[in-house]
Image (tube, grey):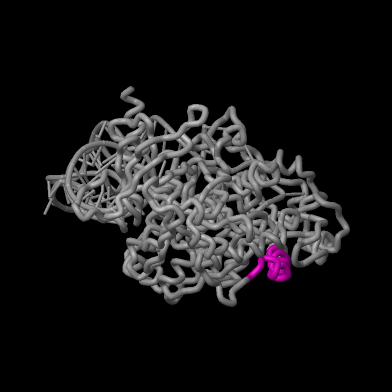
RNA sequence: AGCCCCGUAGUGUAGUGGUCAACAUAAGAGAUUCUGGAUCUCUUGUCAUCAGUUCGAAUCUGAUCGGGGCUGCCA
């Protein structure tokens, strides 16, 4: 709560000022207005946290409103996924679920009002002519030959548009502003177009649909929004937003723009994400490699890690590119405090403890979360044959390698000290380690207080269970895959973004977990149970590795060579 | 080229005329530790440039340079 109070940015500053000057009688009412034409991504999460967060902070309200003004792109599937995602993130719109399509009648009436004021006209020009006559950045546009029709004619033509007399593209309704305006958006923008398409909610009731510019401000006005927060590309539309509401003489919210989120090594445009999904470069909208909310959930991100991330990146008007590492830090930070710990071996290497009694199985006590005592303890089975990680053994160790090697003693986490005495190779590959254990070191402590250089994780061979573990890496090989003029972003996909490990061994307690449960495999990283898990096949996704200073040492070692 | 927006450590954000420019993260060094994790300490900036206003400028003014957006019947 304290950090919420302290959170400040230029938008909250505007709100503070509006409250001070009593601009909206102290009211704060925001909205999150997704178009249901795709799945939500982390960029939307930033906007959700902003809009719902502001409402919370100021004891205001935040509406969920679907901006469904284009029937050709929108689907009910997306509506449901968006609602699920917002709820999962931890926000609630209560009973304020709205659709732009709920206001189609009202928007139509407003359009008639605008025509009656002599501020809108029906244009018969072809799309090509309209475009040509709009002018360019440096040249003014030309007025349409249909611009000065009488109000009566416009009214009747607009009525006929609504009745379906005309074909798509044959006529449009335009605002009558100024064809020489330096802001191209003000050069008689189109506010209604003919689309003989079935709408996901209104069906075939309408064949004319409002454009964004016409609809958005009206939606905000109807809902008595105070602060209409959107992204930077709408900055040049603000004069229009204000113009419409002023002409109509209705309640006026204020539009405020902020910079959208860019994350390195991924793409954040719905069009591109849809392309990746449709062309099967990824396995659906919830592919764990995608920055979609559904994908991140499946990958193992927690709602609070995403909320914290959004809070920490801040709100500003400067375009920026956030390092993917910052997102990783946010999950680690959250999961370190909350995730239960287990042991699992990704690439098993068999270890036979020669002096351990044949057939004996003992239960060893392990701590569930060293950061949270209340998480308690659990037992894990130990026996003569165990698996350790292949990478925890080196036949010819680097100078700074502290783990297993012939003659080396290490601690098995929550187990015993073991010393490697011999190795077995097949085709030059180490397949089995022979070790001895010190019975005095049960639980991981040596009575003589001798130290051991490292502690490694393990699972009992017979008592472990099999699992398929999926490892993920960045989706693209370039920091900004859309920033290249000569490459299509899909040419920059990382071919190694998804690896499947089929022979993993994990401790038996894992079988108690259910789909989407998040946990840590000690020393490896944070993981999550994949929803495709069945009774005979456990599938686990790796969210992120632990910070790995060994990787750095290794890199330095290789560079020195 | 016209209009609009933006330039503070590698990255991101704060700083709204007055102590050594703050915080987070990353990187590097050290301490500590039964996760090479976590934790703790230290190190890392011509505040885009130039000129002006002022006793005093990251903060105000102007110019320049650099980045982004805008010519859908998309949002």
| Any part of residue A182 in sight | no
At x 38% / y 34%, what residue is drawn?
Answer: A394
Residue A129, magenta (yes or no): no
Q: Compared with residue A357, is residue B29 higher up or lower down, i.e. above or below?
A: above
At x 56% / y 76%, what residue is drawn?
Answer: A94
Q: Which residues are magenta?
A: A98-114
On the image, the x and y values in percent for residue A514 come to 56, 64
On the image, the x and y values in percent for residue A182 come to 56, 44
Q: Quadrant of residue A214?
A: bottom right
| Any part of residue A67 in sight | yes
Q: Compared with residue A338, is residue A292 higher up or lower down, i.e. above or below?
A: above
Query: In the image, B19: left or right of B25?
Result: left
Q: Nearer the viewer, residue A325 or A489?
A: A325
Query: In the image, A121: left or right of A461?
Result: right
Q: Residue furthest right?
A: A165
On the image, the x and y values in percent for residue A312 come to 38, 55
Query: In the image, A231: left or right of A523?
Result: right
At x 51% / y 64%, what residue is drawn?
Answer: A89
On the image, the x and y values in percent for residue A74 come to 71, 57
């Amino acid at each position: 709560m304290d950090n919420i109070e302290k959170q400040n940015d230029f938008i909250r500053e505007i709100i503070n000022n509006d409250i001070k000057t009593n601009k909206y009688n102290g009211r704060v009412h925001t909205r999150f207005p997704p178009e249901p034409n795709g799945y939500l991504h982390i960029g939307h999460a930033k906007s959700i946290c902003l809009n719902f967060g502001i409402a919370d902070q100021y004891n205001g309200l935040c509406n969920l409103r679907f901006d469904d003004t284009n029937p050709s792109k929108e689907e009910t599937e997306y509506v449901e996924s968006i609602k699920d995602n917002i709820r999962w993130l931890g926000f609630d719109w209560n009973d304020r679920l709205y659709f732009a399509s709920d206001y189609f009648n009202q928007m139509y009436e407003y359009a008639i009002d605008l025509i009656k004021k002599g501020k809108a006209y029906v244009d018969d020009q072809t799309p090509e002519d309209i475009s040509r006559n709009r002018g360019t950045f440096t040249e003014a546009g030309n007025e349409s030959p249909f611009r000065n029709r009488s109000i009566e004619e416009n009214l009747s033509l607009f009525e006929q548009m609504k009745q379906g007399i005309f074909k798509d593209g044959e006529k449009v309704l335009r605002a009558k502003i100024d064809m020489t305006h330096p802001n191209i958006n003000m050069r008689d923008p189109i506010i209604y177009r003919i689309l003989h398409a079935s709408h996901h909610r209104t069906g075939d009731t309408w064949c004319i649909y409002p454009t964004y510019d016409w609809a958005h401000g009206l939606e905000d006005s109807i809902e008595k929004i105070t602060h209409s927060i959107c992204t930077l590309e709408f900055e040049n539309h603000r004069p229009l937003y204000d113009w419409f509401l002023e002409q109509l003489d209705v309640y006026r919210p204020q539009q405020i723009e902020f910079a959208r989120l860019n994350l390195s090594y991924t793409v954040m445009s719905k069009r591109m994400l849809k392309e990746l999904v449709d062309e099967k470069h990824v396995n659906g909208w919830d592919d764990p490699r995608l920055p979609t909310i559904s994908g991140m959930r499946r990958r193992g991100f927690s709602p609070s890690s995403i909320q914290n991330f959004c809070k920490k990146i801040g709100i500003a008007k400067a375009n920026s590119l956030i390092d993917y590492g910052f997102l990783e830090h946010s999950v680690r930070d959250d999961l370190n405090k909350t995730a239960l710990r287990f042991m699992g071996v990704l690439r098993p290497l068999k270890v036979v403890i020669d002096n351990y009694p044949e057939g004996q199985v003992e239960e060893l006590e392990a701590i569930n979360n060293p950061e949270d005592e209340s998480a308690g303890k659990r037992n894990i089975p130990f026996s003569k044959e165990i698996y350790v990680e292949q990478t925890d053994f080196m036949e010819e160790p680097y100078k700074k390698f502290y783990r297993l090697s012939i003659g080396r003693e290490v601690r098995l986490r929550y187990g015993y000290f073991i010393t490697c005495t011999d190795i077995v190779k097949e085709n030059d590959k180490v397949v089995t380690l022979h070790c001895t254990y010190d019975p005095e070191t049960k639980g991981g402590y040596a009575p003589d207080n001798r130290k051991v250089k490292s502690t490694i994780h393990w699972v009992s061979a017979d008592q472990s269970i099999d699992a398929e573990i999926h490892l993920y890496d960045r989706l693209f090989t370039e920091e900004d895959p859309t920033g290249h003029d000569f490459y299509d972003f899909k040419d920059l996909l990382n071919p190694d973004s998804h690896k499947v490990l089929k022979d993993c061994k994990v401790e038996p307690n894992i079988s108690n977990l259910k789909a989407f449960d998040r946990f840590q495999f000690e020393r490896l990283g944070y993981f999550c149970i994949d929803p495709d898990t069945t009774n005979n096949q456990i599938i686990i996704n790796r969210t992120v590795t632990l910070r790995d200073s060994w990787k750095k040492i290794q890199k330095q070692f290789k560079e020195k060579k």
